[in-house]
Image: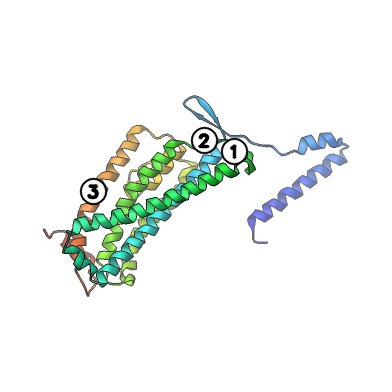
Amino acid sequence: MANLGVVRSIEGSLRDIAERKLLKEENFPEDRIAELTKEVSLSTMKVEKGKEKKGGFIGEYLLSVLLVSLLFGVIMGYGQILMRGVVEEKNARIIEVLLSSVDSFRLLLGKVFGVGLAGLLQVGIWCFMLFGSYFYFTSYLPMEFQGFTLSPSIFLSFALFFVLGYFLYSTLFAIAGAVSNTDQEAQQFLQPIMFLILIPFIIAFSTIQNPDNTAVVLLSFFPFFTPILMFVRTAFSTPPLWQIALSLGLLVLTTLGITYLSAKIFRIGILSYGKKPNLKEILLWLKVK
């Protein structure tokens, strides 16, 4: 039997049967056996600003896990859409036509904004459907999921880190498309970007258990990890304001710096055809004025 959940369920049922059998052998009355073996129902409360809120932890736990997964999935998904779009337009020589009307920096920002707005719209639709379904079916859900309040701070934090994280990574995806001639070449440049996104996503699930761990706190200041790790920390704990401000400041500065460098690479790479550039050649492009 390979399913661990099924094994544990069977073990629990057998344990209950054995307990009831032993109690009967000790001549306990049925009402006393029922009282001793009844299941314990745990009701969670969240204390915020000195006030108790019903059903705080489990509901917000699942909500935060869902939003972290959504953050990861949308950045990855729409980043790759942006990358493939740049490769296709480059091969079709559409880019050359566009550059006759607008400079490369505005073209880069236009692509990032356009794909980003599409992603934001899709996230909005998903959230509307999700929470609409929750409020409609809330009476059918277990008690742990009923009555918890949707904290506006979670959504504000999600929106902020989603926008900044998307802009940071989308410029890297655009570069991967600009320096590639085919989808196969783009996939090679994609690997280090995926590595940067995947690491904080994996760490996030251990961060949920201990959001104030020293290693997690330090990693949350690394700009490429900040969108996911700092969001998880703000969702499951209350980091000092200076930590949030510092991580956001580093993230914004890094995003601006990466965007500036990306525009220089994009300007040359988008019009380069034939041989795939190596890292040394790409770094030389940064020196071109």
Q: Quadrant of the N terminus?
A: bottom right
Amino acid found under the numbered disc labelled 3: Leu
Mark 2 or mark 3, which is nearer the start of the sequence? 2
Which residue extends farthest bottom? 274
Describe the element under mark 3 as helix, strand or loop. Answer: helix
Left or right of 84? Residue 93 is: left
Q: CA distance from mark 3 to mark 1?
A: 43 Å
Q: Which residue is mark 1?
A: 146
Q: CA distance from mark 2 to mark 1?
A: 9 Å
Amino acid found under the numbered disc labelled 1: Gln
Q: Are marks 3 and 2 in contact (CB under 8 Å)?
A: no
Q: Which residue is mark 2?
A: 149
Q: Which residue is mark 3?
A: 256
Q: Quadrant of the C terminus?
A: bottom left
Percent across and percent down for residue 28 are 86, 36
Left or right of 245? Residue 272 is: left
Q: CA distance from mark 3 to mark 2?
A: 36 Å
Q: Is residue 221 above or below residue 117?
A: above
Percent across and percent down for residue 70 are 44, 51
Report which quarter residue 108 is drawn in. Answer: bottom left
Q: Is residue 5 above or below residue 148?
A: below
Report which quarter residue 217 is drawn in. Answer: top left
Mark 1 or mark 3, which is nearer the start of the sequence? 1
Q: Which mark is residue 252?
A: none
Q: Residues within 10 Å of mark 1 (few under 14, many from 20)?
A: some
Q: Residues within 10 Å of mark 3 (few under 14, many from 20)?
A: some
